[in-house]
Image (tube, grey):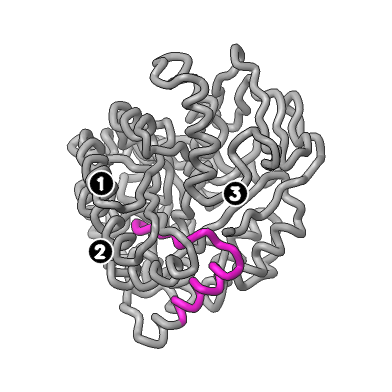
C-alpha cells in the first residue's frame, strides 16, 4: 500500500495532542503509552504485528503537539521545536514528512513553514509526501505548492492520491500530470498515487470553513450550538461540497455518536429525509455530537481521471485506508470498500477487463515500484536475499467483493499471504503467526 498519513499521525504525541489520541485509542480498547516516534515504533513491535509497516511523521501531529489547534503562525521557538520533532522522528526511522493540508491543524501552515520542516527531513534522507491543499478548484495550485516545497527542500515528492473533485474540475488530472512531468523533466524526483475508486473517504469536518476551526475544537463546539453560526457554517460548507449530487453524495460511515450511529451507511440527504431534520441541522449535529470526528465517503471523482492517474508510469496504487476487519472493534464503522478491495479491483479492472496492463506490469506497480519509491531495501521482488513477502493468488477466481453498502467483505482468490517468510494467511484464515516488522528508513 502507498498512503501518506492524511490525518495527524500517532506521533509525536504531546500536550493537547495526547488527549485527542487517547480518546481515539479508547475506542479500540488501547492505552496511550508513547510520546515519540521511537517509543511508538517499539510499541508496535512489542505488539507483534502480522504485517510490515513503514511510517512517515505527520506534520499535523507535530504542529498540534507544539502549537495546539489554533490558526496561528509559529514563533521562532515553536519553529525550532517543530523542526526538532521532525529530526527526532527521522532519527527513529521515519521515511519522511507527510502533510494532510485539508485537515486542521496542519492546514494552518503556509508554504514557508512546510518547506522549513521538509528541509529537516531532507537533510536526513527523507522525502515529502502530501495530501495536497486542494483537490477541487485549487488543484493545480496545490500541485505547484507540493513541487515547490520539494524543490526548495531538496527531496523527493510524493503527491498522495492525485484526483480532481467536482464535475467542473474533471479533466484537470491531465493538466496536473503535465505539470508533474515538466517538473520531472527539469530534474525533480516526483511521483503520485491513486486508488481505483471514484469515491474518496475523509472527515465530515473537511467541509468546515477555516474561520470556524481556527480557534480550536472548543470554540467550534460553541459555534455549532449557535443558531446564527450554524446557518453561516452550513452555507459555506455547502459551497465547499464538491459532490456531484451535493449532500446525497456524502455517506456517513462513522457517526462517532450514539444518536447518529443507526444512520451509518446513509447519505446526509437520506438522514435528513428519515429524521425530518433540515440538511443544516443534520450536518451541524453530526459534527457537534461527534466533536467533529464523523467520517464520510464522498462521491466526487471521474473514472477517466482515475484511470489516467493509476495507469501512468509515475502512478502508484494506494488504498488510502485504515485497516479494518469484519469482527471486533475494527468492525465498528462501514469503511470505504477500498479497505478490502483495492488491489483485487486494480488487477481485475486494469489487467483482466481493460487489458491496459499485463499481469507482470501490474504486479510490478504494486510491489517493486512502491518498495523502490519509498526506499524499502530487499523487498518488492522475488529474488535471492530478499525478504519473502508473498501473496498467493488464484488468478481465475480473483475479484473484489466489498461494496459501499457492505464493505466488510474479503476478496475472493487470495489464497495465502507470507510475511517475512512466515505463512500468515491461508485459505482466508489467519494462521496466528505474527512476523511483521517496523520498516525503518535505511
Asked whether the residues under the numbered discs 3 and 1 touch, taking CB atoms below 8 Å apart as contact, a structural biologist would say no
> How many residues crowd mark 2 within 10 Å: few (<14), some (14–19), many (20+)?
few
Check the image and report above or below for 155 versus 172: below
Instruction: Indicate whether residue 97 is drawn in magenta.
Output: yes
**Left or right of residue 381, residue 244 in this image:** left
Tell me which corner region of the image, top left, top right, bottom left or bottom right, holds residue 325: top right
Q: Nearer the viewer, residue 190 or 378?
A: 378
> How many residues crowd mark 1 within 10 Å: few (<14), some (14–19), many (20+)?
few
**Left or right of residue 275, residue 226 in this image:** left
Q: Earlier in the sequence, mark 3 or mark 1?
A: 1
The secondary element bearing badge 3 is classed as: loop
Residue 211: x and y in percent read 27, 67
Circle 2 sits on which residue? 228
Q: Earlier in the sequence, mark 3 or mark 2?
A: 2
Instruction: Indicate whether residue 339 is drawn in magenta.
Output: no
**Left or right of residue 287, residue 255 in this image:** right
Asked whether the residues under the numbered discs 1 and 2 touch, taking CB atoms below 8 Å apart as contact, a structural biologist would say no
Residue 412: x and y in percent read 62, 20
Q: Residue 185: which numbered mark, if any?
A: 1
The secondary element bearing badge 2 is classed as: helix
Check the image and report above or below for 298 versus 105: above
Circle 3 sits on which residue? 377
Q: Quadrant of the C terminus?
A: bottom right
Residue 130: x and y in percent read 38, 55
Q: Earlier in the sequence, mark 1 or mark 2?
A: 1
Asked whether the residues under the numbered discs 3 and 2 touch, taking CB atoms below 8 Å apart as contact, a structural biologist would say no
Residue 290: x and y in percent read 48, 56
Residue 272 visible? The answer is no
Q: CA distance from mark 3 to mark 1?
A: 26 Å
Q: CA distance from mark 3 to mark 2?
A: 56 Å
Tell me which corner region of the image, top left, top right, bottom left or bottom right, holds residue 219: bottom left
Amino acid at each position: 500500500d502507498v498512503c501518506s498519513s492524511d490525518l495527524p499521525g500517532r506521533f509525536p504525541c504531546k500536550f493537547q495532542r495526547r488527549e485527542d489520541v487517547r480518546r481515539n485509542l479508547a475506542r479500540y480498547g488501547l492505552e496511550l503509552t508513547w510520546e515519540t516516534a521511537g517509543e511508538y515504533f517499539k510499541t508496535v513491535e512489542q505488539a507483534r504485528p502480522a504485517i510490515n509497516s513503514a511510517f512517515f511523521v505527520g506534520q499535523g501531529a507535530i504542529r498540534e503537539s507544539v502549537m495546539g489547534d489554533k490558526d496561528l503562525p509559529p514563533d521562532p521557538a515553536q519553529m525550532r521545536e517543530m523542526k526538532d520533532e521532525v529530526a527526532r522522528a527521522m532519527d527513529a526511522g521515519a521515511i519522511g514528512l507527510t502533510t494532510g493540508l485539508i485537515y486542521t491543524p496542519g492546514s494552518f501552515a503556509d508554504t514557508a513553514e512546510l518547506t522549513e520542516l521538509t528541509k529537516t527531513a531532507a537533510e536526513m534522507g527523507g522525502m515529502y509526501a502530501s495530501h495536497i491543499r486542494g483537490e477541487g478548484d485549487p488543484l493545480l495550485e496545490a500541485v505547484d505548492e507540493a513541487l515547490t516545497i520539494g524543490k526548495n527542500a531538496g527531496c523527493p515528492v510524493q503527491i498522495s492520491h492525485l484526483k480532481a473533485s467536482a464535475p467542473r474540475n474533471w479533466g484537470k488530472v491531465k493538466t496536473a500530470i503535465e505539470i508533474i512531468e515538466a517538473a520531472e523533466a527539469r530534474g525533480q524526483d516526483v511521483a503520485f498515487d491513486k486508488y481505483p475508486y471514484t469515491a474518496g473517504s475523509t472527515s465530515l469536518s473537511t467541509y468546515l470553513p477555516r474561520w470556524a476551526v481556527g480557534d480550536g475544537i472548543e470554540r467550534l463546539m460553541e459555534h455549532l450550538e449557535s443558531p446564527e453560526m450554524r446557518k453561516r457554517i452550513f452555507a459555506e460548507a455547502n459551497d465547499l461540497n464538491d459532490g456531484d449530487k451535493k449532500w446525497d453524495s456524502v455517506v456517513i460511515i462513522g457517526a462517532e455518536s450514539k444518536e447518529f450511529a443507526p444512520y451509518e451507511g446513509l447519505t446526509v440527504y437520506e438522514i435528513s429525509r428519515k429524521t425530518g431534520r433540515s440538511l443544516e441541522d443534520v450536518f451541524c449535529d453530526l459534527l457537534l455530537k461527534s466533536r467533529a470526528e464523523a467520517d464520510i465517503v464522498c462521491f466526487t471523482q471521474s473514472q477517466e481521471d482515475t484511470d489516467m492517474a493509476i495507469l501512468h508510469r509515475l502512478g502508484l496504487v494506494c488504498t488510502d485506508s485504515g485497516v479494518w476487519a469484519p469482527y471486533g472493534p475494527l468492525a465498528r464503522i462501514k469503511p470505504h470498500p477500498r479497505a478490502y478491495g483495492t488491489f483485487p479491483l486494480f488487477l481485475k479492472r486494469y489487467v483482466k477487463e481493460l487489458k491496459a496492463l499485463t499481469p507482470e506490469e501490474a504486479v510490478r506497480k504494486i510491489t517493486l515500484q512502491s518498495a523502490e519509491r519509498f526506499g524499502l531495501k530487499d523487498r518488492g521482488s522475488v529474488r535471492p536475499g530478499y525478504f519473502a513477502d508473498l501473496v498467493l493468488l488464484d488468478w481465475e477466481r480473483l475479484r473484489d467483493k466489498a461494496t459501499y453498502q457492505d464493505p466488510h467483505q474479503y476478496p475472493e482468490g487470495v489464497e495465502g499471504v507470507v510475511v517475512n517468510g512466515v505463512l500468515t494467511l491461508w485459505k482466508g484464515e489467519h494462521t496466528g503467526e505474527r512476523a511483521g516488522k517496523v520498516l525503518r528508513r535505511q
